[in-house]
Image (cartoon, grey):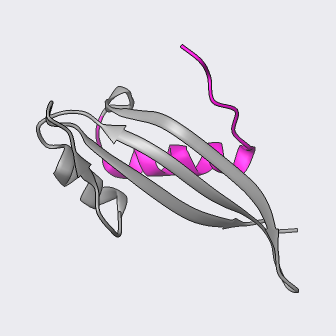
Amino acid sequence: MMKIAMSPAASALLRILTARAGVERNRILLIDAHSREWQSLTFACERHHLQLRVTGCDSGEVTTRIGVIGEARRALDGATELDIEALTITSD
């Protein structure tokens, strides 16, 4: 299995999302992750795009606990796949 390289902020975001889901960590699979630096006049940030796959017959319910806005995709095996976009702000 190939490990996806993630920034510390993206890793923290993934930990928070999986904790919020309220299921065993091994039910939430990271398919892909991309982060890039983003800045405004007042903030230093990172924009993140995570692709997740939640397994199990209750996967649709689990994704509502994560706070997903938009369409999640239901797979034939009952899993749910979703894309998450987030912005993390660096505090100095």
Q: Which residues are magenta?
A: 1-23
Q: Quadrant of residue 72?
A: bottom left
Image x and y of residue 13, in percent: 57, 52
Residue at screen point 15% across, 30% down = 77
Q: Is residue 9 left or right of residue 78?
A: right
Q: Quadrant of residue 27?
A: top left
Q: Decide whether residue 56 is among the magenta residues.
A: no
Front in this rendered view, residue 6 or 25: 6
Residue at screen point 53% across, 13% down = 1
Front in this rendered view, residue 87 or 91: 87
Image x and y of residue 37, in percent: 80, 60
Q: Is residue 6 left or right of residue 56?
A: right
Q: Is residue 44 left or right of residue 54?
A: right
Judge whether 85 appears above or below 8 on screen.
below
Residue at screen point 39% across, 32% down = 25
Judge whether 81 appears above or below 91 on screen.
above
